[in-house]
Image: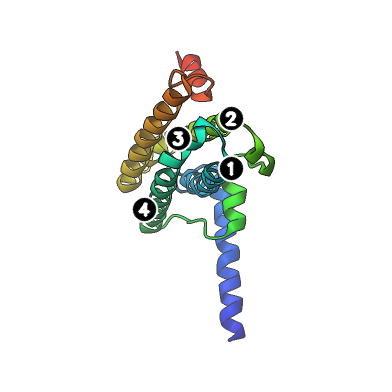
Amino acid sequence: MDSLKTNSAQAFANEQERSQHEHHVPTAGAMIGHITANLAVHALKIEQAVLFAKGPSALFLNQHGRSWIQRELTFWEQINRALYVEADLVPTTSRELLEYSMLEENGAAKYDSGEQQLFDLIKDFDTQLLFIDRAIKLTEKEAHEGQNLLMKELYRWIKEQIALAQSFLGNEPTKGLSTADDDKNDD
């Protein structure tokens, strides 16, 4: 029994070493690991906003928040399976999810205005697009077609959610978002 634990521990150590290497290269799998971590953390942040937002944004979040959570968790599961199929690494521990997520968490944010909480979720969607865009390019380069299709579907869905929520707040789809700034810099 002890030899099995030793072998398991060594296999996990090897996986962690591979992960560090792939994040420095980067590979499609490593970039997608960031995306799955972002999805998991974002689902928690949506839950917080659904529970604590006040005012008109609370109505919007009650109407859309639960479906956002379900859709993100569905993407999370599909993407993890696509990673596994390509023999890419799948973040499987809460430590990995927190390490790989690029979304900022702040427990005090639940006391912000409902509008601010909603806009913070929109900014998180926008941050996710940066990683998804990079992953699309890497999956094309590495010919990981299943992953590529999922990344494009996720990108499209997130853009739609940004536009929907921004419209509710009375904003243009790209107002206050970094991808809008990045698009201007690409010209």
User: Which residue in the structure is indicated by mark 2?
Assistant: 116
Give the amino acid type for the residue marked by disc 4 in the picture.
Answer: Gln
- Labels 4, 2: front one: 2
User: Which residue in the structure is indicated by mark 4?
Assistant: 78
| Residue 7 image-quadrant placement | bottom right
Give the amino acid type for the residue marked by disc 2 in the picture.
Answer: Gln
Image spot of residue 168 (x, y percent): 44, 26
Q: Quadrant of the N terminus?
A: bottom right
Give the amino acid type for the residue marked by disc 1 in the picture.
Answer: Phe
User: Which residue in the structure is indicated by mark 3?
Assistant: 60
Marks 1/4: CA–CA distance: 29 Å
SS of the residue under disc 1: helix
Toward the front, the furthest residue is: 55
Q: Horizontal placement of 59 versus 93: left or right?
A: left
Q: Residues within 10 Å of mark 1 (few under 14, many from 20)?
A: some
Image spot of residue 37 (x, y percent): 52, 48
Give the amino acid type for the residue marked by disc 3 in the picture.
Answer: Phe
At x 57%, y 63%, the residue is 14
At x 50%, y 19%, the residue is 175
Disc 1 or 2, which lies upstream in sequence? 1
